[in-house]
Structure formats: C-alpha cells, structure tokens
Image (cartoon, coloured by chain):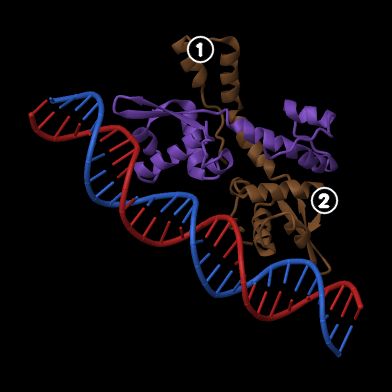
Chain colours: A purple, B brown, C blue, D red
Amino acid sequence: MAIPAQKYDVFQAIADPTRRHLLQLLGDQEMPVTAISSHFPMSRTAVSKHLRILAEAGLVKERKVGRETRYRLEAEPLLELKRWLSFYERYWENKLNVLKRFVEQDDDTTELIFNPLKVVDPDK
Amino acid sequence: MAIPAQKYDVFQAIADPTRRHLLQLLGDQEMPVTAISSHFPMSRTAVSKHLRILAEAGLVKERKVGRETRYRLEAEPLLELKRWLSFYERYWENKLNVLKRFVEQDDDTTELIFNPLKVVDPDK
DNA sequence: ATTATACGAAACCATTTGGTTTCGTGTCAA
DNA sequence: TTGACACGAAACCAAATGGTTTCGTATAAT
C-alpha cells in the first residue's frame, strides 16, 4: 500500500480563514455543499474546492445523499496540531511566569508546570 | 499610529514546514542568520525571508549584535492557536468517548454526540 | 587601509493558491 | 418525460508563495 502522498496537511488546511470558517460551520451539523456555500462570499465551486482540501487533510468527511454531498467535521486530525503546540507551551509559560501571570483552567498547562522538562519533537 | 496591517498571521506562519523547523531550532537558543541557515537546504536569503514572516506573526524576535542579526523564539502568539484549538477539543473527545464505549451502533446517539451545540466562536 | 563577513534589498522566476466561468452528469420533482 | 437542482471537472486567470542571484552597505579582522 503506497503512502497517500497527501497534498494538504492539517497545518496548511487551517492556514486559510475560509477553511477555518468552514470547520466552525460544520461543527454544528452535517451540511450539503450549496447550503454551506450560502455562508460565504464566493462561488459554490470555490467552497467545494476548500472542502476538498479539508477532506484531504482528514478534517471533514463527505457523504453522498441523493444528489447532495453532505460534509461534516472530523476533528481528530487536530490532535496533531495539539501535540505540536504542546512542545511550545513551556516557552510561553516561562515568559508568563516571569510576568507572574497564570493562564489556568487547563489540565495540560498544569501538567507542564509540574513537568517542565518534558520535551517532545514537535514535527513528526 | 496605523495598524501594522499584519500580512502574515500565526496560522499562515506555521503552515510552512521550513518555518516550523525554524521555530524548533530557535527554541534552544538565539542564533544569527547564517548559523540558522546552515541547517536548511536553501539559500541564506530564503531563510531570512522565512524569518521575516515569522517575525511578522510575532513568533520570533530579532536583535542586532554587531554585524549579526540574532533571532530567538517568541512563543506567546501560539496561545491564539491554542485558544482556537480548544474550541474543537470537545469534538474529538466526544469521538474518543464513542469509540471507548462502543456505542456506534445507535444512530441517534451517534448523531447527537457528533453534533453538539456550538458554544464559542473559535475564530477571533 | 584593505579585505572578509553578515546581512538585507531588489529583481527575477516557476509554481501554487484561490478564485472565476462554463459545461456535463446524476438525481429529484411535475 | 421534461425540467430543475446539486454537484464536480475542467479550463482559465491574477496574485501570492517560495525560491534564486546579484548587489550594496555596515561591521569586524588583518
């Protein structure tokens, strides 16, 4: 089985504001393309292309229903982003500690405060 | 004082693998441009451009020392990313719960779990 | 004083990106 | 069966992106 040669990864997929808006919209419910595109100031075809990019990154799933193609959010690939981000938490926390400030109410934050030397290679 | 008209935001800045590599490299220490560029298979000028993009997004700071320009990581802007991400945590967490409890056979339950109510506007 | 080093600016280039319009096809409705 | 609707594919386009090379200038070293 060959590697999918995935053209768009999560980082690229979320780089575009339109695509972030799409993810937000699809969080609520599965929607067909025309309904989705009514929320955007561009053609249905353009929105469709963005959806395909999101699908390539695994961030949405499509389902054919009659003549419609319905899309829904698929959030798991964002875990890669979260993992990447966690590598950098200690940096901004050090800075914030200097300023004697706390960005609280987050389990991961707490964990890193107590394990400040835990380091993971952020990319791949 | 005019608004900087920031051309590159954090999302765009981290979309490029070279720039993510740069952030990783600069986490360890402040470095001058030539030393940085020795880690990349491209010209110093190209690396310099990437650094400027990162600087525009606030992810690195530069400091002139003699004839050198030294760069260091500035992690705070990644907090915006963390905040954006946190909106989607409940989606993948719900999905993981579904898998954990083996309740995927029930379509109604799955529907509700997959499409929870919107709470916070994730973008801006 | 001269030469070498570190760097940015500028011009340039190929490819990618984000959009458009047009057209073909499958599906639903009258 | 005849439209109307939902959609993707394809061709096309301007602008952005990621790279190059060349050159000028400030600083450091000899």
Query: Badge 1 sits on which subunit?
Result: B
Mark 1 is surrounded, within 10 Å at the Cα level, by few (under 14), some (14 to 19) or many (20 or more) other residues, namely some
**Residue A73 point in image, percent of width and height:** 49, 29
- Helix, strand or loop for disc 1: loop
Say if A11 sits above or below D18 in the image: above
| Disc marking residue B19 | none
Mark 2 is surrounded, within 10 Å at the Cα level, by few (under 14), some (14 to 19) or many (20 or more) other residues, namely few
Is the C terminus of chain B in the top left, top right, bottom left or bottom right quadrant?
top right
Task: Identify the residue shown where x is 72% and y is 44%.
Answer: B76
Residue bearing mark 1: B104
**Residue B11 point in image, percent of width and height:** 60, 45
Residue C19 relative to residue A18: left or right: left
Say if B85 sits above or below C13 in the image: above
Say if B60 sits above or below A62 in the image: below
Residue bearing mark 2: B29
Is residue A42 something one can see in this rendering? yes
Query: Badge 2 sits on which subunit?
Result: B
**Residue B32 point in image, percent of width and height:** 79, 60
- Total count of labels: 2
